[in-house]
Image (cartoon, helix red, strand yellow):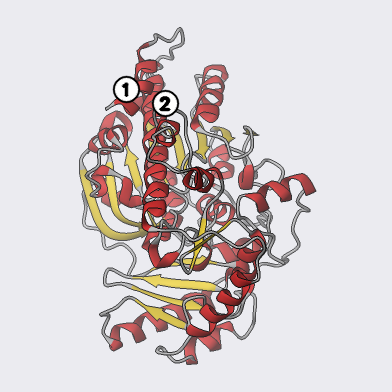
């Protein structure tokens, strides 16, 4: 496949570096593929051949087929992963990773056990200026909204300079599958050279495309209005309000047809293939350094994206599987137990206790996750009865996902003292709730009860004051569809 071969050819170059096997606990590598949908991974059912390197990795590791993110946007999701706390427990509605002094992070705990800790992130919402830096010895960002093209070399440079006698924890992040998706030839740009691609379609791909009620828009004022409205966009009242907003935008928004939507999805798939190719290069470089035999490698996505489901091309207004269902692959040192599949419902808050269990460290008190180590060993594992996900400004959206389906609440934000009572008393067939079709009424009540119990158990942040986001970074985040939540 030309896309893959283009970058896999890079893996043939010999590396002058190498490290002898080290005695003691394993190293840990965490790779986050931002905005990477689970349904694009071959081992999770995709048949388009987009991810041969991830599929090979899965054959040497353990695949969690029903893993769910705890947040629909980047910063809260990663903060949740690194603390094993739910998003609204950490920072309420703030736009910075305000991790409380008594709330410990994965690198912080590993550092206490003698690990060298480093993060190499792709800027943007994980910028060192506002990101979850707590516990890392070094935390460096690439160009804002960068690629594995940037962060893999940064990570390898750190690996080559570290103390090889000590274990390491390295976190590597990429925005490769984040909108606007376009990647270099042959992964993306070659497609727009096709005579069948119109100038209008090229314009769509050049922008961060959003579709609301079948209309393209690149107006972030509109996105802001949608996410801040008290009405759910899919409700009749919400649709009428959106239609009025769309009608008032000048110049008028261009309609989007099925061919345009297919092209956007096609370019997203190109970004998936590009990400996979660079992931293959990364694994080849680790193999050259003899690191695969003594490193636990966790590969995940912080959330997915919406590619036309419900008429949307943005994850602001849904917590559906296209957003919350994420790849979660774990490779044990040497590929031990590779090829297993675990179908239990799991959450990304489980990553911290899993890693700490595998390295023989004690998880801190108050964490929300459950160690997946029994599942990795092939032992019976029940998982979670429900996966909880939060989204929207102020985390005003909440969903409970079971094996049977999803119940989603949309209304007042998580810091409102009335939310628990609202969850407990609102009509399940009213505007506050939306459920997967076909779930029996009794199961919906069970899910609602689980939501209420879960929410009442949350620790409320002591303060929602955020580190002030630098104005230039705020503009970059707005330009990519991220918003300050106050």
Say if 419 sits above or below 162 in the image: below
Q: Quadrant of the N terminus?
A: top left
Q: Residue at x 50, y 59 (%)?
A: 314
Q: Residue at x 46, y 58 (%)?
A: 256
Q: Is residue 17 visible?
A: yes
Mark 1 or mark 2, which has the lower sequence index?
Answer: 1
Q: Position of residue 104 (x, y in %)?
A: 59, 52
Q: Secondary structure at mark 2?
A: helix
Q: Secondary structure at mark 1?
A: helix
The answer to which image quadrant residue 382 occupies is bottom left
| Along the line of sight, the residue nearer the viewer: 423 or 276 | 276
Q: Position of residue 137 (x, y in %)?
A: 64, 33
Q: Quadrant of the C terminus?
A: bottom right
Q: Which residue is mark 1?
A: 5
Q: Residue at x 57, y 17 (%)?
A: 161
| Along the line of sight, the residue nearer the viewer: 114 or 305 | 305
Foreground mark, 1 or 2? Answer: 1
Q: Position of residue 207 (x, y in %)?
A: 56, 47
Q: Position of residue 403 (x, y in %)?
A: 27, 68
Q: Which residue is mark 2?
A: 282
| Along the line of sight, the residue nearer the viewer: 294 or 480 | 480
Q: Residues within 10 Å of mark 2 (few under 14, many from 20)?
A: many
Say if 395 sits above or below 308 in the image: below
The answer to which image quadrant residue 139 occupies is top right
- Is 46 on the left or on the right of 163, as rendered? left
Q: Is residue 139 visible?
A: no
Work out how far the residue at label 1 is from the one at label 2, CA to CA, in angstroms: 14 Å
Say if 127 sits above or below 56 in the image: below
């Amino acid at each position: 496949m030309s896309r893959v071969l283009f970058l896999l050819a890079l893996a043939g170059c010999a590396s002058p570096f190498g490290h002898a096997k080290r005695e003691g606990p394993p190293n840990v590598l965490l790779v986050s593929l931002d905005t990477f949908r689970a349904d694009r991974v071959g081992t999770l059912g995709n048949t388009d051949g987009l991810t041969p390197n991830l599929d090979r990795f899965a054959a040497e590791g353990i695949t969690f087929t029903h893993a769910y993110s705890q947040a629909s946007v980047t910063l809260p999701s990663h903060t949740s992963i690194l603390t094993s706390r739910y998003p609204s427990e950490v920072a309420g509605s703030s736009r910075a990773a305000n991790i409380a002094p008594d709330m410990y992070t994965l690198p912080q705990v590993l550092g206490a056990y003698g690990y060298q800790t480093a993060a190499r992130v792709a800027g943007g919402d994980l910028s060192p200026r506002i990101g979850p830096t707590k516990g890392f010895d070094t935390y460096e960002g690439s160009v804002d909204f960068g690629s594995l093209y940037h962060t893999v070399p940064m990570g390898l440079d750190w690996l080559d300079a570290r103390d090889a006698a000590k274990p390491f924890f390295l976190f590597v992040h990429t925005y490769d599958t984040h909108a606007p998706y376009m990647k270099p030839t042959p992964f993306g740009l070659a497609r727009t050279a096709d005579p069948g691609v119109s100038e209008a379609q090229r314009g769509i791909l050049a922008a961060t495309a959003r579709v609301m009620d079948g209309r393209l828009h690149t107006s972030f004022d509109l996105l802001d209005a949608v996410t801040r409205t008290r009405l759910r966009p899919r409700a009749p009242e919400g649709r009428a309000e959106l239609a009025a907003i769309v009608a008032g935008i000048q110049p008028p928004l261009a309609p989007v047809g099925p061919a345009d939507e297919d092209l956007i999805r096609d370019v997203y798939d190109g970004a998936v293939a590009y990400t996979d190719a660079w992931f293959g290069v990364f694994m080849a470089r680790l193999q050259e350094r003899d690191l695969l035999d003594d490193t636990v490698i966790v590969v995940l996505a912080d959330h997915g994206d919406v590619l036309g489901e419900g008429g949307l091309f943005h994850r602001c207004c849904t917590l559906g599987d296209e957003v919350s269902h994420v790849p979660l692959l774990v490779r044990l040192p040497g590929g031990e137990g590779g090829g297993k599949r675990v179908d239990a419902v799991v959450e990304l808050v489980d990553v911290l206790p899993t890693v700490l269990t595998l390295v023989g460290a004690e998880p801190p008190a108050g964490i929300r996750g459950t160690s997946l180590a029994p599942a990795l060993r092939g032992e019976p594992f029940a998982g979670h009865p429900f996966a909880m996900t939060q989204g929207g400004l102020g985390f005003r959206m909440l969903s409970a996902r079971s094996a049977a389906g999803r119940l989603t609440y949309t209304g007042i934000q998580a810091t409102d003292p009335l939310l628990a009572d609202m969850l407990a008393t609102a009509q399940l067939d009213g505007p506050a709730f939306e459920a997967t079709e076909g779930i029996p009424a009794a199961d919906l009540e069970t899910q609602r009860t689980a939501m209420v119990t879960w929410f009442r158990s949350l620790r409320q942040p002591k303060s929602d004051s955020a580190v002030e986001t630098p104005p230039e970074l705020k503009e970059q985040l707005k330009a990519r569809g991220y918003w300050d939540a106050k």
